[in-house]
Amino acid sequence: MMRRKCSVYIESSEDTRQSVAAEVQVWTSTYVNTLKVYYSLRNNLCAEGSVENEQIPDVVKRISKLDKDLVAVENANSVAVRWTPNDEQYKAAMQIQVVAKCKQLVEKMKPVSQERQFLLKLKEKYSDGHALSKKLAKQVKNCTKKLKEMLTQYNSSRDSLSTENRQQFKELQVGDLAIEVTGLFTVGENLQIPYSVQRQAIDMLHLLKRSKEEIKLVEQEMNRVFLYYKNEESKLSARIELLSSDNCSLHSLGSISLLKSAQKILQNRLLLMHSSLKSYIPLENIEFSPPMSNNNTPVECNKSSESCPDESSADDSYED
């Protein structure tokens, strides 16, 4: 029973300590920020030529207001002497703020870096002159600009850290974006796979699914083309049978001859398509019967008719 009470007391005391530390960090952060602005305005006011004469009253009013705010914070937190930039407490509080800012900038750079890497991978799939490639290039440029701005702030904040705190953060150069940023940030804390590798795996999975869809579409198109030419050959065969059943004339014989020539071309094409496509899609076997011989008696020309002139008369006319 006593152990339980002791453990509960220890847990409650730890919670109390954490809450007190958080409250101290909040008011010290506010206090230091106000001091920073206060000292900056006062130094600018003292320097010659830094503030125009018209702006001096406004600056004085702002300094007076900041002084009142500082007095209120100091009275509320029992600060006997106002901190100066050379005090250890001021420097420690500033270090805490800079460390927090560096961490915040790193968190902000994560999604921008991930988006930039994704856009670069996506841009590689299109040629340079493609419309999508140009659009992606603009998006990459915007992401690079944002990342450069944040990297500049990050490096500037990192330079103001102490030697001990500076070791916690890796130095990043603007020119090393393609090298340093790739694989630097991961999605989770315990995840060891770089984000670029994850994105590449996702792209490959999407490519695999898209390839399967393309294969199905190509198979459907193969089947449509084969059926189209088969139907065309069936129409020609039906037309030839229809003309063959009628009384043959010179016109009918010529039409049948032309249709059979076209039918022979389609049959050869179908046989070639069947041999080429049967290994990719299931196709029914096709067989074509040899062309039937025409048993109709040829139409004899009547020499007395005008349509068939006499050979002798043609020779006589040529001699004349």
Image: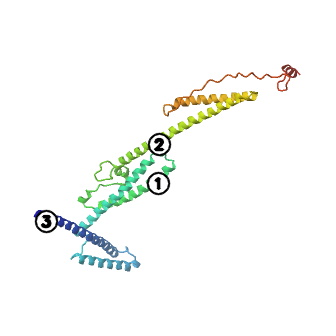
- As measured in the structure, the alpha-carbon distance from the residue carrying label 3 to the one carrying label 2 is 66 Å
Q: Residue at x 24, y 70 (%)?
A: 23
- As measured in the structure, the alpha-carbon distance from the residue carrying label 3 to the one carrying label 1 is 64 Å
Residue 169, by quadrant, is bottom left
Q: Which mark is residue 114?
A: none
Q: Secondary structure at mark 2?
A: helix
Question: x, y (%) of residue 95?
Answer: 26, 64
Query: Which is nearer the eye, 44 or 96?
Result: 96
- As measured in the structure, the alpha-carbon distance from the residue carrying label 2 to the one carrying label 1 is 30 Å
What's the amino acid at mark 1?
Lys
Q: Is residue 74 left or right of residue 248?
A: left
Q: Nearer the viewer, mark 2 or mark 1?
A: 2
Q: Which residue is mark 1?
A: 138
Q: Which mark is residue 213?
A: 2
Query: Which is nearer the eye, 11 or 319?
Result: 11
Q: Earlier in the sequence, mark 3 or mark 2?
A: 3
Query: Does residue 236 sit above or below 19 in this rendering?
Result: above
Q: Which residue is mark 3?
A: 5
Q: Quadrant of the N terminus?
A: bottom left
Q: Secondary structure at mark 3?
A: helix
Question: x, y (%) of residue 2?
Answer: 10, 64
Q: Nearer the viewer, mark 3 or mark 1?
A: 3
Q: Nearer the viewer, mark 3 or mark 2?
A: 3
Circle 1 Cα neighbour tier, 10 Å, few/some/many (<14 / 14–19 / ≥20): few
Query: Does residue 315 sit above or below 174 in this rendering?
Result: above
Q: Residue at x 51, y 50 (%)?
A: 131
Instruction: Residue lying at the far top in this picture: please name it.
Output: 312
Q: Is residue 264 left or right of residue 195?
A: right
Q: Earlier in the sequence, mark 2 or mark 1?
A: 1
